[in-house]
Each structure stands twice: as C-alpha cells, then as structure tokens.
Amino acid sequence: MTTTEKGPVYTGWQDLYREKWKWDAVYWGTHCVDCYPGNCPMRVYVRNGVVWREEQSGTVGSVEQGVPDWNPMGCMQGVSWSQSLYGPDRVMYPLKRAGERGEGKWNRISWDQALSEIADGIIDAIEEVGPSSIFHEGTPEVVTGVPTNRFLGTIGGFGTDVNGSINDFSIGLYETFGKFSLESSADDWFHSEIVLLWHMNAVYTRIPFYHFIAEARYNGAEVVNISPDINPTHLHADMQIPIRGASDAAFALSLAQVMFAENIAHWTFLKEQTDFTLLVRADTGRYLRQVDVDGEGREDQLYQWVEGTGLRPANRGDLRLHGANVALEGEFEVALADGTTVTVTPVYARLRRKLDADYTPEKQEAVTGVHPEVVRTLARKMTRKRSNIILGANACKLYHGDLVERAMCLALAASGNWGKKGAGIRMWSAGLHDGQGLALAKPGPGAANTEIILSARDGAIAMVKQLDPTMTTEMAVREMSRGPRGLLRRAGAALDRSGGKLTGSTAPPAFGWYWQAGYDKRWNVREWGDDTLPRTFDEYFNEALEKGWWAGADKPRPENPPRVLIECGGNMLRRTRGGKNALLPNLWPKLKLIVEIDWRMNETGLHADYFLPAAQHYEKVAFALPGAHVLNLTFSDKAVEPAGESKNEWEIYRVLLGKIAERAAARGIEEIRDERGNARRYDALVDEYTMKGYYNDPERLADEQVRDSALAGTLPPRTTLETFREKGHVRFTDWGLTPIALSQASPLKADETHAPFRDHVERGVPYPTYCRRAQFYIDHEWFLEAGEELPTHKPSPRMGGDYPLGMTGGHSRWSVHSMNHTNKVVLGTHRGEPTALVNLADAAARGVADGDLIRVFNDLGDFHVRARLAPSVRPGQIVSYNGWDGSQYRGWGGANEIEPGMVKWIGFAGGYGHLAYLAMDWQPVPVDRWIRCDFEKAAL
Ligand code: SF4
C-alpha cells in the first residue's frame, strides 16, 4: 500500500497480504485448556491492542542425541485461537439472569451489583447450611483451578475431584501399580520397537506428537492398531487388529497365556516386579499374612516360597531377589499360629490355571473375533521387542475398563516391557511445577519462607518414613496426601498452616451425584451394571460407608445440601455423563445461587444466575498444565488487555472476597463457622487470599511460583518470570514432590528421553501397592466376591437398556473440547455441525442416508445428530465423538442425553492398602463407552 498526502491508497490484494505481516509486539503464548498434553509454545502477534494472529514457535529442540526434535508442535485449534478470543460467543460484561434458569434472557449489570448480590448469596448459604455448601466442579485448567481452589479454601467450600468427573483415571493401572499417572515423554516413543495404539486414536488426539510414532516407524518400529472400528490411525499402522468392542481384556489375557505357555515370558522380570511369587491360601483365597503365621504382626506382610529353604517373608523394601530361587508354581503346606495347617500356592500358579482354562488363543477368538495366530504372532514379538502401549483415556471409560487395563499390564509384565526406554504403558501426569502450591502454602513472601515450607515438607516425609523404614519417598508423599484415612495425617498436618480450620478440600463427585443428583436410582438398575454380582449396588455403597472407607470425602451428604455452585473453567451440564437429565431436575433446585465464570457462554452458564466474564489466553499470565509427556513448563503471556470488562479470575475472586467481607459487616456477621465449629473472620478473607496483599497482582504470584519451583529444584536455579518472557518454555530439572509426578519413579535427565518405572526395575524400588509389587491378585473381599481377584474378561453391561447398538466416542479431530467448536476456522475443517458415524448396513436397515438427521435413543432419552455413513465403523457400533458444543445440537442435546453415568461399584472399595482415596487417584468414576442405543431417521 502506498501512502499519498491524502492517506493510504489501495493498489491490489498484495497490499492486504503485506498488512498481515505487520505487528506492534510479539509475545509467548500457549493454550491452557486441557488439550493434554498440549504445551505447544506459540508466538502471538499484537497490533493496535488486539491479537492479530499466532503461529508455532518451533523452538523445542531434540533432548537426546539421535532422537528427533519436537517441532513444530501445534494444532489447528491452537493456530486459530485468536478467532475464539474475539468470537461471537465471547461474553465481555457481567450478566444477571432475567428469565428462568436456562431461558437465555439476561440483563447486563455492573461488576459492583453482580459481586454484591453474589456475596449476599454466599453469606446466606454459609448462614443456612455452612461453608461446605459452596462448591465448584474440579477443572484440569490450572489457570482457573488455582484461583478457584484458593477462593474456596479461604471461605471453607470444596471442589469435586476433577478426575472423578472427567474420568481420565485409569483405574486398572492404579489397581496394578498403586498409581495411574505413569507416562513416558513423547520423544521416548521413538525408542519403541512395537507401538501398540490401543484405546488411542493418536492421529486425532495427539496431533503435535504423532510425528514421534511416524519417526519410530521410519526407525524400524512396527505400529499395531487395536480397535473395533477402522479409525484414522489404522492408515499408519503395520498391523490392524479389529477387535470386538469391549473385549480387549480377553485379547490381552491371551497374549499373556501364549507367553507363559510357550515359555517365552520374562521370568526374572516378573518374579521381581510382580506379585506372582506371593503365596495365597487355598482355603480362603486370601494372601498368607504374618498375622496368620505368627498370630500377630503386620497384616500386609506377605510370603514367598524359596526352593530349598521354604517359607520367607516377602521383602517390602527391595524387589530384587539377589539370587533366591523363589517359586512360581507348586503347593506348599504352612503351619499357622492357631495350630492348623494350610495349603498355599503362588499367585502365578492360580493365574496360569485361569489363563489355560479360559484364555487360550482359540478360546479368546470366540470373545474377541481375533484369529488365534494373530495373538500368537503379537505375543512372540512382544517378548522380543520393546513394546509400548500408547493408551488413551478410553479404556478407563468402559464399565469394566479396569479389567481391560489390568490385562494389558499383565501382557507387558509377561514380556518384561516396562522400566526401559521405548516400553511400557501411558496415561497422563502432572506436577513438576511445585512452586505453584508452595507459593500459596508458605507463611509469607520470599525465599526464606519457601525454605521454611520446604524444610517442613522434608521433615514430614522423614517422620513418615520413620514409621515404616521400607517406605519410599513416593509412598510417604502419597500417604501424606491422602484424605482423613491417610496413615500419616498427623505428619501431613505439619504442612497445614491453618491448623485444620477452614481449609478447602476435594471430594469425589460420586457421592454428590448419588445423594444430590438422582444417580442413586440409575446405579441400582441391575442390568445397567454387573448383574452377576450377588448384591445390589446399594448394599455395596452402604457397606463402604459403614466401614468408613470414605470418611470425610463422602460429601455433600443429604443433611448438608449444596447451596452455591461456582463454575469456573468447566461446563458441568455438558461434561457430566447423563448431565442435564439428572442435574437439572435433582441438583439445580437445591442450588440457590449458580455463578458461571468463563470467557464464553456455555450450557452451564445458560442455566446460571450470574455470568462473570473472565480473561482468556493472551489476556493474562498463565502456564500450561505440565507433565511427563513434554517435561517443559510452557508460558503464556498477557499480550493484550482483557476484552470489554472481563477480568483475570484471580482478580475476580479477590474482589469478591472483599465484597463478601463488606456485605457481612453490613449484615453484622463477623465469622464463618463451619460444621466442626471452627471459625474464620470475614474481615481477614482478602488478606488470607492475597497473603496480606502481596499477591494482589497475579503476575507477582506467577513470578513467586516460578522462583519457588527453582528453590524446590524442579526448575533451574534463578529462573524467574522474566526467564519465561525471554525463552517461552523451560525444561524441568527434577520431579518435585507431588504424588502424581513421583509416580514416574525414574531419573529425570537433561539429555535423555523419559521412560517411567526405571527405579522399580533397575533398583528394585517397591511399588506403592498393598503388596509392594505390581499387583495382579487383589484379595479385597469385594474383588473376591466379584471374581475379579485376577484380571478377567467380563462383557460390558447393557447400560441404557436392551438396544442393538453400542455407542462409543473419544476426542474428535476438530476440537479441544466444546469451547473451540464455534471458532470459524475450526468450523471450516469439518461439516460444520455434529455428526455420528454409523455403519452402512445399520443405516440402510433404518432407511438412513449420509447427512440425514437421525434420532439416537435409549431408555434414558435421545439426541439428534447428522448421520455420517462410514464403512469403517463396525456393524452394531455408533461413534459419537465428544467435544461438540451444546448449541450445535437441536435443543442443546448431545450424546450425554443417553448416558446413564454408571459407576462401577468396585470403585467404592477401600480399607485395603492403595485402595484408599487420594485426590485424582482411587475413587468411583463414571463410564460412557458402549452405551446401548438405537437410531432412526428424524424429521427435520
Ligand atoms: Fe498445542 Fe493445545 Fe494449543 Fe493445540 S490447543 S496448539 S495442542 S497447546
């Protein structure tokens, strides 16, 4: 464009193109939206005070010599985020409901009016029920979760456990290893010789990282895709194993059966790493325990049989056998303290009998449809090669997903495939940025106060280890972090500077669903659950309560109904399985105040009383959720001011607390008093939240958190917020001391890819399970009653009713959750509205053509969606990818209208070693795969 005295003159399209490449400033950015693992560093270009565009930075180099670099990192949502920033669904002013909840009528109001009225509602709830009647739904978005948790911790509310809501909790990994969050770095996939994409459609869901799989393949790896449908990932596979839906446990058990039967299993590995050598009583099916043998001592001291010398206590502190010839087979007689004798056998002997009886390749074929030679071929290869199950968060959403995952782990154990590069199984992890919590937990600002809290932490861990010298740091931290039943609550109290007063807490959402949201009726529909069980759901539920397995975490109880919901960084009505059908008629009437804090209108916001507009990415300082997958802390700077009147969440809560104090004073109320009689003054709330004003500015908090991570050793020394403004991302230097990060149990090296569990395998460090080994035999009374003491296959129940089709799902290719689906660039990458994939024969039988609107239905309800005819989908299957926005469906419906939100009863088990509540770990979780349904052509 040329400029004359009269101003700029348009000379052609080239002028506009050149204008695109002008900017005033460039910032670092990323997207903290649980696009896990995400962490893509972007460059954000600003012009005239608006974000002009963003692009991938391409700045994450190779970590290990010979392993490819990470670049470019990014996805289509990320490179069009600025479209969402200024999208039509952005809310920029506080709103108050004008009509009925959900009616969509709003009045724009001032911040002062909004916060005054919300403050009064919160005080009303505290006066009527208590502060625990105020809650929020847990969110994986740290940038919203940290301030929300701080706010609720300050007033005494609570949050629901995010992994209990979204169910990215791999219950079977947890049952086996005592932890679910093992995960290699993505570049470690390059070391794999067999990549098993199993319950993972990596082409859709791992866009920034898929290249490591392709590069492993160039490096000679075989890619095996195991799925009921021919999903897009199969295009890049060397071997496609089309398996019947939800039959994966039978397939995996058969892999193990072949490895054992052909004597190609890794015997030394599994003798050391697993519970196979532990002795089980023939009469009770329970482990042989010290209390049996000695009449006193440890309940969790178990035994092995050594050829030549006989019975010995299994070492709880060292997995290595040091040459001992420990039995895997045989029957042995043991004298008990009561004078009787009992026959015992190793776990392996029991397992082997079961596998040979039920899971030979020929027998599994009847269940899975997979040819026996395919099983044998893969089993033999796995025992010879570094095999890596790239597991997604899909198996865990099957009703019997825990059994599937336990069986997968068994196949890996038999083939010696974890604790080394290129091998293992993955889920998700977090932690590492320890300063995030330290900066908020310490008694005052600055490094000296950080040292106080670090010393207290180290002292508490040392105290815990004194109680049981065989405990590892990982175990000690886990026990310190558990709920009220935690062994080491007393030691953990050393870190609780409130003295156990009004601290915020986390609770599994399942109890609220049961007591407050009508799920009790659904979970007791016998045929929607495991109808082979001898007892009803309620009998198990009540037993768990009576035995106190969930004491303190079992809330909100009927006598303490919830009154205020603060939804920030989530969308409860869309996310909850069976959401609207259950929550609106049951939970919503109990809620006297619903506040949505978000940057865009969503389904829960539509049904709220107030909407408070929040700043978005690029409008505030934030960090992406870190984890072992990427191992960087990735920064997103404040590039522009928040749009309209929107505010940073940290600021919203700070001002709200001030308003609560102001309204309390006006009403003559001085204290918040909780159900236990503990009190906190209203006029101290803001000081508590901001550390006496030190954290008034959220950038100062971010800087302090970075500095504290450096002091804790997880970031390089002297790292500050300025370091991130310069570099955009920094690689972690250590795991820190959060349970979820310590799960990796491996060294973290600057110049090596990360593979978890090396400490267990290379140094014999025990696992945090009941038996201190990878535990395949769980002799908890419920597991024995259900026939699930060993991994087994069980068919998926008929959740939703007796219908011919099974609905599955997963992340779509086109979105990071529903928030992106109204982005016009993203809309342009697909048909522009939700679709469900159906098989051609199923469609023809119902007179449905491609693009027809269909009604998908079962006993719970229905939703309307366009049919996408796909020969790749198995007959009898319907695929409804998740992440669509409610507004894209007729009547704001969607797949969760037909999901009952079933929870496997065994998730309520407790009182058994690692089967005890820990935030984001052991708890009941909802399932939503293979929901029974049917469809028909719908009227337009
Ligand atoms: Fe990366 Fe997530 Fe951003 Fe996509 S949305 S570019 S995956 S950080």
Image (cartoon, helix red, strand yellow):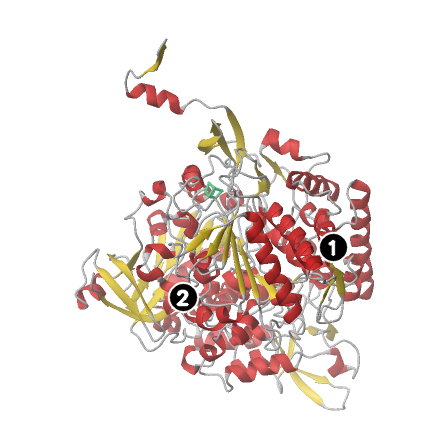
How dense is the environment of label 1, judged by Cα within 10 Å: few (below 14), some, or many (20 and up)? some
Q: Mark 2 near mark 1, Cβ–Cβ under 8 Å?
A: no
Placement of 239 over or under 552, stated as above or below: above
Residue in the picture at 64% in, 41% down: 698
Task: Indicate the secondary structure of the residue bearing disc 1.
Answer: helix
605 or 241, which is in the foreground?
A: 605
Q: Distance of mark 2 from mark 1, alpha carbons? A: 49 Å
Residue in the picture at 39% in, 74% down: 799
Residue wearing tag 2 = 929
The C terminus - image quarter: bottom left
The N terminus - image quarter: top left
Residue wearing tag 1 = 683
Placement of 873 over or under 51, stated as above or below: below
Residue 846 relative to residue 616: left or right: left
Q: Could you tell which of marks 2 and 1 lies nearer the N-terminus? A: 1
Task: Indicate the secondary structure of the residue bearing disc 2.
Answer: loop
